[in-house]
Amino acid sequence: MNNRTVVALPTLLPSIALQSLHYYASRSPYGAIVEVGVYQGGSAAVLAQVPRDLYLYDTFEGMPVSGPLDTHPIGHFGDCSAEAVQAALPLAHVIKGVFPRSLVAMPPVGFVHADGDQYETTRDILAYMPKRMVRGGMILFDDFMVDDCKGCTQAVNESPYRVLIIAETGKALIIV
């Protein structure tokens, strides 16, 4: 831990997943930390404990797309607010908009928490983030093998990267 204030924000992730998220983010190569799919900010608050630049991307209006492999309809998870996340995590760069159109200039990235649920969002993370990352950077996919996130699993499986499975959580990790 560091001297940053720890803020408790709502999350859908169990404690073991949050502990694993912090573990991998804090052990990734030095660089900015990015989260795509912030929702109400619970996992972002865990990432904010790692003393690095933090970039948080979300529509803050719910799911922007829904394809044939996706269970969540457009607008699902819309009960969130960019302003509330920014107020709770004032040092973070909170970016509202549809990823990747909302991408802003960032320093090289060491860690990405990919929590976009849907196929298109996950595919876009895989297309846009690795080229912005330092060698050995990590992308952790929150929704890999989750029953109602088959699109995420499909996009990860289609990627050219070797996928590692974290035994404790079943999450997928890619090292670029």
Image (cartoon, helix red, strand yellow):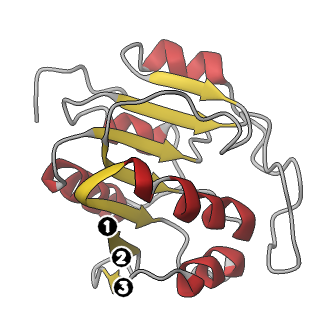
How far, Cα to Cα, is label 3 from label 2?
18 Å
Please tell me which residue is depicted at 60% across the width and 81% down the height of the picture: 153
> Is 123 or 87 nearer to us in this picture?
123
Of the pair 165 and 14, the residue shown nearer to us: 165
Which amino acid type is marked by label 3? Arg
Residue topped by disc 1: 176
Task: State the CA–CA distance, disc 2 to disc 1.
Answer: 21 Å
Tell me which residue sits at (85%, 56%) in the image. Answer: 65
Residue where numbered disc 2 is placed = 169
SS at mark 3 in the image:
loop
Give the position of the C terminus as an image quadrant: bottom left
Residue occupied by mark 3: 162
Up/down of 119 relative to 35, above or below = below
* Coordinates of residue 108 in the picture (x, y in percent): 31, 39
Q: Position of residue 158 (x, y in %)?
A: 59, 85
* Callout 1 touching callout 3 (CB < 8 Å): no
**Snapshot quadrant of residue 51:** top left
Viewport quadrant of the N terminus: top left
Name the front one of labels 2 and 1: 1
Inter-mark Cα distance, 1 to 3: 9 Å
